[in-house]
Amino acid sequence: MTASRAEEFEAYVRARTPALLRAAYLLTGDQHLAEDLVNDALIRTHQAWPRLWDGSPEAYTRKIMYHLQISWWRRRRRSPERLTDVPPEPARTARVDEQAQAVTRLVLQDALSRLGARQRAVLVLRYFEDLSESEVAELLGVTVGTVKSQSAKALARLRVIAPHLLDSPTSDRKLR
């Protein structure tokens, strides 16, 4: 790799790592696992950089990240920790809104962890990454119909698992 391409890769990593970490956190539900996932994806992107540097390295990195996560899900068939049905009482301070948002995030994280790998990936890509159905289908290597059906099934399941997310003041009504 030439010096200029190496500098371009370093600039890409500096610019895109925060966004990649956010997406990875939504996929893994854990900050440390998200960091590992992004690191592994960036290693593979670096290896492919000579043929990617003038194309779309972002799409390549994200695709690698999603595929790695699905592989980890398949290998690791253990059940994650579960939240209790009743969240702790919020403190009686001005931080009640922040606490409500944190509780909503935790409930959403738990609800997403109860979905299958494909359904979770489809929801994260569609609603958190804001990709179109065709972009999600291409990224995951499935048909648009599969994306639509998995999305509908996942949303229906989320409505059963965590119906209070629909009424949360911090929800953005995308689950309806």
Image (cartoon, rainbow, N blue to C red):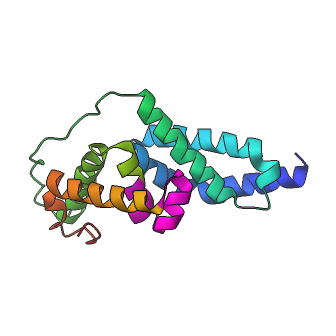
Task: Classify residue 127 by image quadrant.
Answer: bottom left
Q: Residue at x 51, y 66 (%)?
A: 134
Q: Is residue 69 above or below residue 145?
A: above
Q: Position of residue 99 (x, y in %)?
A: 21, 57
Q: Is residue 29 visible?
A: no
* 169, 93: nearer the viewer: 169
Stretch of the chain drawn in magenta: 122-143
Task: Classify residue 55 by image quadrant.
Answer: bottom right
Q: How many marks?
A: 0
Q: Main secondary structure of the magenta part?
A: helix
Q: Residue at x 40, y 28 (%)?
A: 76
Q: Position of residue 176 (x, y in %)?
A: 23, 70
Q: Position of residue 100 (x, y in %)?
A: 19, 60
Q: Residue at x 88, y 55 (%)?
A: 4
Q: Residue at x 74, y 52 (%)?
A: 10
Question: Is 87 contained in the magenta span?
Answer: no
* 55, 84: nearer the viewer: 55
Task: Classify residue 170 by image quadrant.
Answer: bottom left
Q: Is residue 50 visible?
A: yes
Q: Classify the position of the N terminus by image quarter.
A: top right
Query: Is residue 9 shown left or right of residue 152?
Result: right
Query: Is residue 90 shown left or right of residue 98?
Result: left
Query: Is residue 119 shown left or right of residue 18?
Result: left
Q: Position of residue 14 (x, y in %)?
A: 66, 55
Q: Is residue 76 above or below residue 126?
A: above
